[in-house]
Image: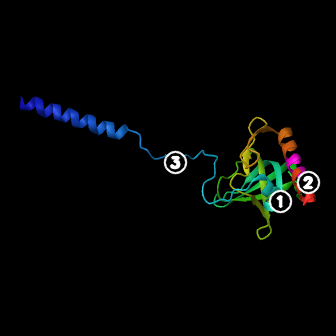
Amino acid sequence: MRKGIALMMIAVFGLLLSSCATSETHSNPPDTHRSEVQGDWPIYAIEEMLKGRTDLIALAQVDSVSDDKDPQTAELRLEETFYGQSANTAIRLYQSTRQVQPGHKYLLFLSYREEIGQYVVSDGLSQTEVDNDKLQVKVKGIEGEYTIDQFKQVIEEKEASIAGSLHAS
């Protein structure tokens, strides 16, 4: 009888331990594939971007990246510019987080940093990888999925709206 109770207690104890080991926790596990902002990056609306928070909005192909990963310098080839101008179609991007990958194409909102002679992303939502010629834009005020032509039209309309509001003032 005692042997039966002892075996039953061991079985119950074993079940309790195994259920604790496999139960889900209530905290969020780290997700290395999140595209959202992590850290203390500023977030700007499209109107703020077009009023000076960004220097260049462009579609760029990543030709190469430095061996250094923190920070990383990437060599980009501009394929299309939607806003601003660059002196060259080849530019350098300085990044410490959410680094671009060689061979991939991105929509980037960039700010030029004179002190380092390179571009940086303008805010925490300024980098979108192109997926099958679709852009999943997260910048406030223009969030959504666009084709490249649709995105170009949205930027032109926002620029016109800002120019109109400046002239009306």
Instruction: Please report whichever mark, 2 or 3, sits nearer to the chain's N-terminal start.
Output: 3
Circle 2 crowding by C-alpha within 10 Å: few under 14, some 14–19, many from 20:
few
Residue 2 seen in render: yes
Q: Which residue is mark 1?
A: 51
Q: Which residue is mark 2?
A: 164
Residue 80 seen in render: no
Circle 3 crowding by C-alpha within 10 Å: few under 14, some 14–19, many from 20:
few
Give, as a three-letter code, the residue at label 3. Answer: Pro
Quadrant in which the N terminus is drawn: top left
Measure the C-alpha gap from mark 2 to mark 3: 45 Å
Q: Is residue 40 left or right of residue 89?
A: left
Q: Quadrant of residue 167?
A: bottom right
Measure the C-alpha gap from mark 2 to mark 1: 13 Å
Q: Which residue is mark 3?
A: 30
Instruction: Please report whichever mark, 3 or 1, sits nearer to the chain's N-terminal start.
Output: 3
Secondary structure at badge 1 equals: helix
